[in-house]
Amino acid sequence: MSVAAVSDDKIPNNVDLASDKRLQRALEQWLPSYLGWWQEIGPERSFQARDVYLRTAISVETDGWANFDYVKMPDYRWGIFLTPREEGKTIGFGDHMGEPVWNEVPGEYRNMLRRIIVTQADTEPASVEQQRLLGMTAPSLYDLRNLFQVNVEEGRHLWAMVYLLHSHFGKDGREEAEALLERRSGDADKPRILGAFNQPITNWLDFFFFTMFTDRDGKFQLYALAESGFDPLARTTRFMLTEEAHHMFVGETGVDRVVQRTAQVMQQGKDPRQEGAIPIEILQKYLHLWFSLSEDLFGGEISSNAADFFASGLKGRYKEAQYEDHKVLTGEYRMTVPDTTKGVGKLVEKDVPLRTAMNEVLRDNYVDDCQRAVDKWNRTLERHGQSARFTLPSRRFHRNQGLFAPQQAGTRFDPAGAPLSDDDWSRRRDEWLPSAADMAYVESLMKQVTAPGQIAAWVAPPSKGINGQGFDFVYVK
Ligand code: BYC
Ligand code: FE
Ligand code: FE
């Protein structure tokens, strides 16, 4: 068999990989490193030989990309798919607005673009590493399958970015692609790039909140990159969004099912702890944790990087077409900022040039989307006769990046956004974030359930299965 045939078989793609021998060779050399990484630090070894009911992207057509079948994860065909090129497409925002989109990397923006791609890429394997052991405590076969679906797709997202690095960044790109397999989530010496991707995910509550809040950062970042003037990046992130929708679904409905179970138990007049369900106050603390960690992923409120990304046409806004002014040479954004000259914890309103506020603009879209999901969970509580309600904390709460990080603001903030001394923070932290006891309780519930149609006591079954199958379908053999 020729090398081309082997490669096309191994790396499904719609980028005519076979016609570019250099690129094909580079990716073929990276493939074993990737598989080595997957075996070493991907889903726990005992699951690698199992048949999992997975969907595989085989083309970008609506009927083609979701192909469902039993697959062993190491045999998953991680492919490279870009949405089709559009004739006459022009750059939609920034200083190059109206010029034809770039199909090659513009020299002046090479470093900036590489950095954006590497940062995006780094999150994908990081999340797989974080979720490595969760299969051991999956609450049902349905959930186990969804975990692995998310994992293989994050692996594919890494491929999508590595394709860009290999095809457009020469030697540096290949080095970056290697380094992506060398960093490790949570490692003291070689950590992943962004904060939330070094946080431990030790149980399924973390997982559901992570896919709800942290994958949702992915959704908004991918939308912003799907506007890029660098067309290969725009086209690849556009396709990634179709997979991301499932990750959003896993998180949002996962939390909702936990809420539902708790509310059902309470409606029967029972104590959630006695029934092995998770009390509402613990759920609220995990919500606080993952929402605040994920807000940090949008970067600083005022950012010259963000202004440069926008000006250069590399990273736009969420659904850029919804705005009237795409150049944003004028225009301001009013935000609340700490003013330490007025005293510790003093906040003032300030107008900043809109281009420098692009991180905050994207965070606004994100917070709105999170609120919509929270409203949904609250309706679940209401339907079960519960008066408690979930709330998103203030954006100032528990931040570690930007203006409200303690080192910048000179103070901490409570969930309502009021300043708080370090002493008060230490004293009250466990009211707002999972305490050691909360975590121990949640961990105590995490027991693997493998019988088809069975489910753990802390979560309600889904209203329907995957791809028209029932909940009792054998999703993992
Ligand atoms: N942790 O100018 P600033 C996903 C750094 S998730 C650590 O305010 P900027 C997925 C920053 O790098 C989507 N460091 O920030 C989800 C800068 O460093 P330097 C991932 C941070 O650059 C689940 C300094 O602080 N995609 O796909 O405007 C599962 C000042 O920063 C953090 C992207 O992120 C942090 N949280 O914005 C799987 C898109 N935040 O210059 C996958 C690409 C900031 O001082 N990335 N810093 O060394 C970007 O657009 C930007 O890098 C960021 C940061 C929006 C992340
Ligand atoms: Fe992803
Ligand atoms: Fe995702």
Image (cartoon, grey):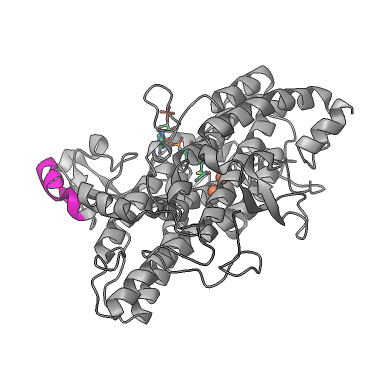
Tell me which secondary structure the magenta stretch mostly adopts. helix
Where is the N terminus found, in terms of image quarters? Answer: top right
Task: Identify the image quadrant of residue 187.
Answer: top left
Give the answer, above or below, for where 422 lies relative to 169: below
Front residue (pair 403, 92): 403
Which residue is drawn at the image coordinates 51% and 61% (left, top)?
451
Residue 466 included in the magenta stretch of the image: no
Which residue is drawn at the image coordinates 39% and 48% (left, top)?
295
Which residue is drawn at the image coordinates 56% and 68% (left, top)?
471
Q: Position of residue 62 (x, y in %)?
A: 75, 59
Task: Identify the image quadrant of residue 161.
Answer: top right
Front residue (pair 124, 419): 124
Q: On the picture, is 54 further left or further right than 270?
A: right
Give the answer, above or below, for where 402 lies relative to 171: below
Q: Position of residue 362 (x, y in %)?
A: 47, 51
Q: Position of residue 68 (x, y in %)?
A: 70, 57
Q: On the picture, is 36 further left or further right than 420?
A: right
Residue 422 included in the magenta stretch of the image: yes
Front residue (pair 259, 293): 259
Q: On the picture, is 427 further left or further right than 107?
A: left
Q: In this rendering, does residue 92 appear at all? A: no
Q: Position of residue 413 (x, y in %)?
A: 21, 49
Q: In this rendering, does residue 34 appear at all? A: yes
Front residue (pair 461, 286): 461
Which residue is drawn at the image coordinates 89% and 27% (left, top)?
2
Give the answer, above or below, for where 417 lies relative to 98: below
The magenta segment: 419-431
